[in-house]
Image (spheres, rainbow, N blue to C red):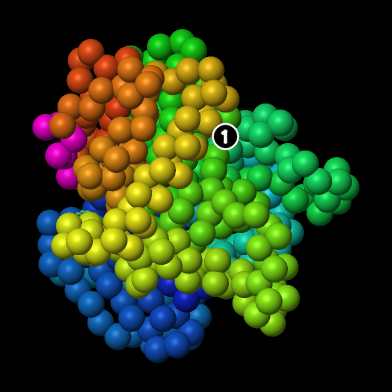
Amino acid sequence: MNVLVINCGSSSLKYQVIDSETEKVKAKGLCERIGIDGRFAYQPAGGEKEESEKPMPTHNEAVAYVIEALTNEKTGVLKSLDEIDCVGHRIVHGGVNLTHSYVVTEEIIKEIEDCSDLAPLHNPAHILGIRACQKLMPSTPMAVVFDTAFQQTMPEKAYLYAIPYKFYEEDKVRKYGAHGTSHMFVSQRALELMGNPAHSKIIVCHLGNGASISCEIDGKCQENSMGLTPLDGLVMGTRCGDIDPSVVEFLCKKRGYSVEEVLRIFNKESGVLAVSGGMSDFRDLADAASKGNDRAQLALDMFAYRAAKYIGSYVAAMNGVDTICFTAGIGENNGMIRGMICDYLTFLGLELDDEANKVVGDEKLISTPESKVAVYVIPTNEELAIARETVALLK
Ligand code: ADP
């Protein structure tokens, strides 16, 4: 089956066509600046990337260009629209009710709309993408895969905040976690690599510009470091992660900020960017630190320290750990950070294989045979996870 995977933002649309039998990407690309001037990119597997400016007043035009490129006589990978067997849409937030993947129906779209206040930048855009696909492919079956679904197995004691219960009951304020599709993909792959043992305890570190850590018992998510929103948890590229909420009021009073301004600073001007004094990319940070920039080094130290603290707390939450996995831009590519984090964890009997830990971007066991905890680098693949879910659901 050919699965078209769509990841829609308010002004962008990422797409991939995946052959579900071979799990290979046939083509991929990106529509950007939707509603502004429109930029289109398309790349067939093994072929040249094509980029062009195309007018895209709405998501409808974007989807139309995607179909046109995929079925283009010269460079297309499909003969006609009929060869798209199904469409899988990534959805950021499913609230408390949407707990797994679903076939798209009007009721499901309404539910996605209903939890838009939990992801105001994302959910409305996802619906635009669904509608555009429905318009151009009215008889193609579609599924929605939620970033929050994998975390729905978290126990109440993990996802509730210790604030008045009515805020949970009436306003749905709780921990939802994030990057669920990635945590699902990587933990399932880790289980396979471990030989699917019973009572497995896994920790997944999704370390990218946005970063989160999760833990799974028997493949079921128990915890995720993100909270109601993706601001919580780790120190990130530009986000502060854990912070005493009183800092908000303190800064508002002291500096005359509005709550919105403080939250914008916490989201966009904090994290390693703020600590280092201007760098959010970990390649720049590593480079600067190696040249003696103390603030860059401090940012790296804080990032690794916070990540190690989360791992330690999840080891306690699960009363043990068998396997720790690293994924996403930093987790897959940055051996130095993996090493810095694992240095805190030798008390677990964890022993990193320094040579194996040099791996960049490939799946690899990076702990020694003697290590009491297996450590893997497992490249994440959210699109493939969405394609698998879509096919499983529609079959
Ligand atoms: P997001 O998807 O949250 O925007 P990514 O998962 O792409 O983020 O991660 C971005 C981070 O990954 C950057 O800090 C970047 O430095 C790091 N990164 C990406 N590729 C490499 C690489 N080859 N070597 C080292 N770090 C890398």
Which residue range is magenta in the image? 355-360
Residue 3 versus residue 343 in the image, above or below = below
Q: Is mark 1 within 8 Å of ligand 1?
A: no
Rendered location of residue 183, percent (x, y) = 45, 39
* Image region (quadrant) for ligand 1: bottom left
Q: Quadrant of residue 351?
A: top left
The quadrant of the rendering that contains the N terminus is top left
In the image, 364 versus 345, the foreground residue is: 345
Can you name the residue that lies furthest to the top here?
A: 198
Q: Secondary structure at mark 1?
A: strand
Residue 127 part of the magenta segment: no
User: Can residue 52 be seen in this snapshot?
Assistant: yes
Rendered location of residue 138, percent (x, y) = 53, 61
Rendered location of residue 159, percent (x, y) = 68, 38
User: Residue at the spot x=40%, y=12% of the render?
Assistant: 197
Return the residue at label 1. 223
User: Residue at the spot x=54%, y=72% of the render?
Assistant: 265
Rendered location of residue 129, percent (x, y) = 52, 66
Amino acid type indicated by mark 1: Glu
Residue 292 versus residue 384 in the image, above or below = below
